[in-house]
Every structure is written in structure tokens, then in C-alpha cells.
């Protein structure tokens, strides 16, 4: 169905220097099968995916990409490529938050994908096709919500909308670039099963790109590895950080509630305390309110109840020094990093706000880049010129560089391969050993939580239904919902 022969992809930096990110890569996709391409962050997986549909405008592409046994995609003109993209080859991008237009209703976005290739389709047939698509991707609940915007959907729903758009024109090939990266383990499993179902029902050839070989191993008919060997890490085998006996409370949350208009969940009556040098992990399904709670704790959205930091300081006072002490790492680095700023300006922005001089800024940047194994060459690049994992480490650098006392981490490793995940988590351990810092780590990955947290809060429909020591939550959960989440890792 598709074969790649000796593909080499090169980019040029601001100084005109050429860097090859993919070199002499070859593979073939058998018809009506699922092929998984796995590798570490930065190994070139997404570059290969975008090369197949020739979406890398400023890259130099050499080699051949033969589609349907006769067309070399790399030799096609733009008008010829437009007939293939979205019709013959569908693409599910890594992040639905940036792939879906936030200003357009989901119904209109699905319509657009169909009408581009079928401009004369009748309104009746168009509406019928949209309903059938939603049913195919198991989104019956959205049939009467076509006027909703992407931000009104959960992560799993947005990903299914992306799949609906990708299969709207019955493509021969479907490229899924990290389609489950930001999803909890339950929804992740549902999405992967859906892809398998679509492969069988629609006889589609699927290229599934992932950094997680364990995720795709049960699904793929063949697995192709690129870059270094990928090793799965059992985080529960690691020893937690040694803690001192300082039980000073650094955060007290009392009856925290968040209300959203047109949302099908709210945070309500959340209560917990966080001690110095202590870590709390928060788990729950997509849409359970984890990220909403993180933004409320950071003072980024309005909330009710009390959020008391340190010496009775709270967000309502908008204390300048407090914002330095409490930092957040967002779930999606692509949308949280300013695309118009180079990496140096992004990482140093907080330091400038807090009046660091140029020499101090240069010293702190060099230090944090060394700790995070980031190349100083990245400083002159823009976020889109980095891989997903590299962007995530830049987001972490931006927060850690201010030396906070409380760090809220919202899915900090979801976009990272196992090796990089391990590096980041060990780095967080090292930082905690050096000084008294407390973490609130939010994740859909229980193993990440188990590695770094000593207490776990289980969130469901915006409420904490279970809160206890890590060992007790994992070994003997009290609620059926918690048992369900944990069962996927056993």
C-alpha cells in the first residue's frame, strides 16, 4: 500500500547549517494491517509521518515514498497532493487541542473535511454522513452537540472527533501520530480498540506512531523501531525520595469548588493538605477534573473555597513573590509555549520578571539545560522546531528555573518516551533532595504517580473519592472505580 525507500529529512537552522533528523529510513505498510512505528522522543517518528503527506514545508526531503504501488509522493506538485491529503491518506495529529480549530464548532469542522473533497454533496447527505461518522467513532452522545466547541469536550471526545475527520473520506491509509498520548489509561484503551475496529471494518491500512511499545504491542501486526532501544520502566520498583521529619503544611485546600458553564463536570468540595517535602499524586479518567483542579490551585481560574499557601497567603491577594514559589507545568507544551518566542526568551521570561540580570539569566539557563539534558543549540529555535518530548522539557525548564517551593505538574511526562520519563522523574527527585520542595503531580499514568508520590488522590466527576498513602491505594483500593483504573496496569 505504501513503501518508503531511503528517506532522508534535513532542516536548516537560522545560520543555514543543515541537520539531518531522519537518514536513509525505509519501511513498507502492508494493506489492511496496523504497523507501529516506535521510538524515543526526537527520533524522527512525527517527521516521517509528516513527510508521507509532504507537510514539512521547510525541510529537504530525499528518497522515495511510493503510494498505491505507483505514485512517488515526493515528486508530486501541491495541487496533486491536495487530492491525496485527507482523501487517500488521513492523518490523526498528536494533539487534538491544537489540531482542532478552537473558534469553529465541531460539526462545522467535520463538514469542512467532507466538503473539500465532495463540494457538490447535498445538505441531507452531508448531515447523514456526519451522523454515521460519529457512530463509527462511538460518539453517539455528540450527535446532538454539533454546535459545541472543542474546549467543551473531554480529551477522549476530541481525539474521536479527530478520528472522525481523518476517516471522513474513506482513506486507504490512516496515519495516527501518538493518538493516545494525553489520555488516561481507560480512554487510551478505548481509542486503540477503536482503531483496530476501524482497520477491520473499513479495511484501512494504519500507521500507528508511538513512543510506547507496550501500548502498541497488543494492537500492531508489525512493529518497526527507530532510534535507540526502548525499555519499559516499572516505576514501582524505584525507591521513593528519603524525606525529613519536617511536617510543616505548605498548602491547605478547604472545600474547593469550580463551576463551569456548559461543562458536564465540576470540581466540588475538595479538601487536602500538602506538607513540605511531600508529594501528592492525582489520578482519574479523562474529564474527571484533574487539570481544572491544577488551574484552580495555580490561581488561573476562579474557584470557591480556600487555597492557603505557606503563611496564610492566598491567590486572592495576587502576591508577586508567591507566584514565584508556586509554579505549574501544563499538560500540553505546544499550546503553553509561545510560538512567536524563541526558546531562550521562553525559559528566561520568569527570571526577567523577577529582575535577574543578564549574567544571572545566562548562568541559570545553562545550569537548567544541563540538568534536563537539553542542547544549548535549542535556545535559538522556536517551539515548532522541537519534538514533543523536547518541548515538554522546555516547559519543565521554564518552571523549575525559578526554584519554586511547590510545583504543580499536570501530565508532565505524557508526551515523553520511557527513557526521558525516567530522566525527568529522577531529576525531580534530585531537586527535592537539594531543597524542600513539594509536588502535586497529576497524571493518567499510575506508574508515574507511583514513582514519585507518597500519597494518592483519586478524582472522579470532580470529587476526591479516595485519598490515602500510595501503598494502600495500590494494594487495597476501597472504591470500584479505583480498582478499575489500577486493573489496566496489572
Image: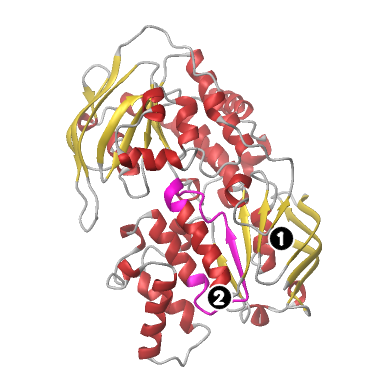
Q: Is mark 1 on a helix, strand or loop?
A: loop
* First-in-chain label (2 vs 1): 1
Q: Which of marks 2 and 1 is in front?
A: 2
Can residue 348 be seen here? The reply is: no
Q: How crowded is mark 1: few (under 14 residues within 10 Å), some or many (20 or more)?
A: some
Badge number at residue 202: 2
Name the mark on residue 478.
none
Q: Is mark 2 on a helix, strand or loop?
A: helix
Q: Is residue 184 above or below residue 221?
A: above
- Which is nearer the eye, 235 or 281? 235
Instruction: Estimate the x, y position of residue 31 in percent, counting from the top left.
Output: 69, 72
Give the residue displayed 47% in from the left and 84% down from the top.
115
Q: Residue 262: percent from the left, percent from the top?
A: 22, 59
The residue singled out by tag 1 in the image is 59
Relative height, residue 243 to residue 438 (above, below): above
Residue at 48% across / 77% down in the picture?
Answer: 113
The image shows residue 165, relative to residue 213, as above or below, that is below
Give the color scheme: rainbow, by chain, secondary structure or one colour. secondary structure
Q: How far apart are marks 2 and 1 (CA)?
A: 33 Å
Residue at image point 28% right, 32% down: 466
Percent across and percent down for residue 51 are: 69, 64
What is the magenta range? 165-188
Q: State yes or no: residue 184 in magenta.
A: yes
Amino acid at each position: 500500500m505504501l513503501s518508503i525507500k531511503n528517506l532522508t529529512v534535513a532542516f536548516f537552522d537560522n545560520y543555514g547549517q543543515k541537520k539531518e533528523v531522519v537518514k536513509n529510513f525505509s519501511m513498507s505498510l502492508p494493506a489492511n494491517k496496523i504497523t507501529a512505528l516506535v521510538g524515543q522522543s526526537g527520533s524522527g517518528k512525527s517527521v516521517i509521518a509528516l513527510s508521507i503527506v509532504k507537510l514539512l514545508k521547510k525541510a529537504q526531503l530525499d528518497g522515495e515514498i511510493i503510494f498505491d504501488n505507483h505514485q512517488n509522493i515526493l515528486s508530486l506538485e501541491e495541487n496533486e497532493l491536495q487530492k491525496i491529503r485527507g482523501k487517500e491518506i488521513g492523518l490523526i495529529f498528536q494533539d487534538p487541542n491544537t489540531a482542532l480549530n478552537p473558534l469553529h464548532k465541531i460539526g462545522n469542522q467535520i463538514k469542512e473535511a467532507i466538503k473539500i473533497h465532495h463540494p457538490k454533496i447535498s445538505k441531507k447527505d452531508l448531515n447523514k454522513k456526519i451522523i454515521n461518522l460519529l457512530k463509527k467513532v462511538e460518539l453517539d452522545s455528540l450527535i446532538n452537540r454539533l454546535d459545541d466547541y472543542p474546549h467543551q469536550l473531554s480529551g477522549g471526545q476530541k481525539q474521536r472527533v479527530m478520528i472522525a475527520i481523518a476517516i471522513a473520506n474513506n482513506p486507504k491509509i490512516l496515519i495516527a501520530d501518538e493518538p493516545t498520548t494525553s489520555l488516561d489509561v481507560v480512554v487510551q484503551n478505548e481509542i486503540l480498540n477503536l482503531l483496530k475496529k476501524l482497520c477491520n471494518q473499513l479495511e484501512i491500512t494504519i500507521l500507528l506512531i508511538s513512543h510506547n511499545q507496550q501500548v502498541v504491542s497488543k494492537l500492531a501486526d508489525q512493529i518497526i523501531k527507530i532510534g535507540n532501544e526502548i525499555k519499559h520502566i516499572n516505576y514501582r520498583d524505584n525507591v521513593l525520595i528519603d524525606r525529613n521529619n519536617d511536617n510543616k503544611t505548605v498548602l491547605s485546600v478547604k472545600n474547593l469548588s469550580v463551576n463551569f458553564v456548559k461543562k458536564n463536570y465540576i470540581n466540588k468540595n475538595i479538601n487536602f493538605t500538602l506538607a513540605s517535602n511531600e508529594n501528592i499524586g492525582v489520578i482519574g479518567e479523562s474529564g474527571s477534573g484533574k487539570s481544572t483542579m491544577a488551574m484552580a490551585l495555580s490561581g488561573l481560574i476562579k474557584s470557591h473555597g480556600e487555597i492557603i499557601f505557606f503563611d496564610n497567603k492566598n491567590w486572592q491577594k495576587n502576591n508577586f513573590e508567591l507566584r514565584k514559589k508556586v509554579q505549574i507545568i501544563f499538560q500540553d507544551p505546544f499550546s503553553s509555549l509561545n510560538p512567536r518566542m524563541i526558546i531562550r526568551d521562553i525559559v528566561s521570561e520568569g527570571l526577567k520578571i523577577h529582575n535577574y540580570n543578564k549574567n544571572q539569566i545566562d548562568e541559570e539557563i545553562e545550569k537548567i539545560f544541563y540538568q534536563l539534558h537539553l542542547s544549548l543549540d535549542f535556545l535559538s529555535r522556536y517551539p515548532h522546531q522541537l519534538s514533543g518530548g523536547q518541548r515538554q522539557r522546555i516547559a519543565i525548564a521554564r518552571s523549575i528555573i525559578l526554584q519554586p517551593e511547590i510545583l504543580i505538574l499536570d501530565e508532565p511526562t505524557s508526551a515523553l518516551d520511557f527513557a526521558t520519563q525516567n530522566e525527568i522523574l529522577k531529576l525531580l527527585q534530585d531537586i527535592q533532595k537539594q531543597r524542600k520542595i513539594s509536588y502535586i503531580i497529576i497524571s493518567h499514568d499510575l506508574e508515574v504517580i507511583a514513582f514519585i508520590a507518597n500519597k494518592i488522590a483519586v478524582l472522579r466527576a470532580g470529587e476526591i473519592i479516595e485519598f490515602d498513602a500510595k501503598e494502600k491505594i495500590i494494594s487495597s483500593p476501597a472504591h470500584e472505580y479505583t480498582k478499575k483504573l489500577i486493573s489496566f496496569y496489572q
